[in-house]
Image (spheres, rainbow, N blue to C red):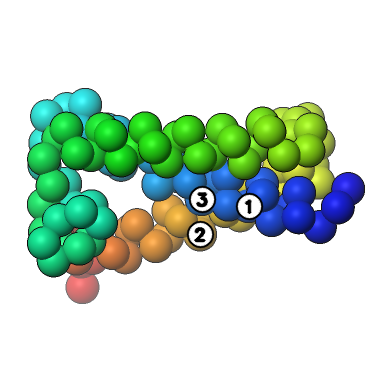
């Protein structure tokens, strides 16, 4: 498998993980941080903006996972970079969004 398939699956996992909080908050009608807020990533965007941003991330994840190579959840070699991408993006979210939503307790 070419090296760029691993990279694609890693970023596919990261984009999928980034879709979750935006879709969840947007679909629930709650404002949430997004790159389109002022200041970017810190201010709140509307639920509609978050649904659109989450769906865009979901579409990019689909392209990276399903249109590059032949991704298979049954292949450990495919799932490892995918899972690491999800894990790292979730850790970034926990630290970044936790500052605003009470997740970084001392």
Residue that label 1 marks: 10
Q: In which quarter of the image is residue 99?
A: bottom left
Q: What element carries label 2?
A: helix
Q: Is mark 1 on a helix, strand or loop?
A: helix
Q: Quick one: label 2 or label 1, which is nearer the N terminus?
A: 1
The numbered dot on residue 88 is: 2
Q: Which residue is drawn at 22% across and 61% down?
A: 41
Tag 3 and tag 2, C-beta contact below 8 Å: yes
Tag 3 and tag 1, C-beta contact below 8 Å: yes
Callout 3 crowding tier (Cα within 10 Å): few <14, some 14–19, many ≥20? many
Q: For the residues carrying marks 3 and 2, which lies nearer the camera in this image?
A: 3
Residue 86 shows in the view: no
Q: Residue at x 17, y 27 (%)?
A: 28
Q: Quick one: label 3 or label 2, which is nearer the N terminus?
A: 3
Callout 1 crowding tier (Cα within 10 Å): few <14, some 14–19, many ≥20? many
Q: Quadrant of residue 3?
A: bottom right
Q: For the residues carrying marks 2 and 1, which lies nearer the camera in this image?
A: 1
Closest to the observer: 4 or 30? 4
Position of the C terminus by quadrant: bottom left
Callout 2 crowding tier (Cα within 10 Å): few <14, some 14–19, many ≥20? some
Q: Which residue is drawn at 21% across and 26% down?
A: 27
The image shows residue 24 at horizontal and vertical percentages of 27, 33
Residue 57 shows in the view: yes
Q: Is mark 3 on a helix, strand or loop?
A: helix
Residue that label 3 marks: 14
């Amino acid at each position: 498998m070419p090296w760029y398939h691993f990279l694609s699956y890693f970023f596919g996992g990261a984009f999928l993980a980034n879709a979750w909080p935006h879709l969840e908050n947007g679909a629930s009608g709650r404002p949430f941080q997004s790159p389109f807020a002022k200041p970017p990533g810190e201010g709140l965007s509307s639920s509609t903006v978050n649904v659109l941003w989450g769906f865009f991330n979901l579409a990019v994840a689909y392209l990276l996972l399903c249109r590059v190579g032949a991704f298979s959840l049954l292949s450990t070699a495919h799932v490892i970079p995918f899972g690491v991408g999800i894990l790292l993006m979730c850790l970034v979210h926990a630290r970044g969004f936790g500052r605003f939503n009470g997740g970084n307790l001392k």
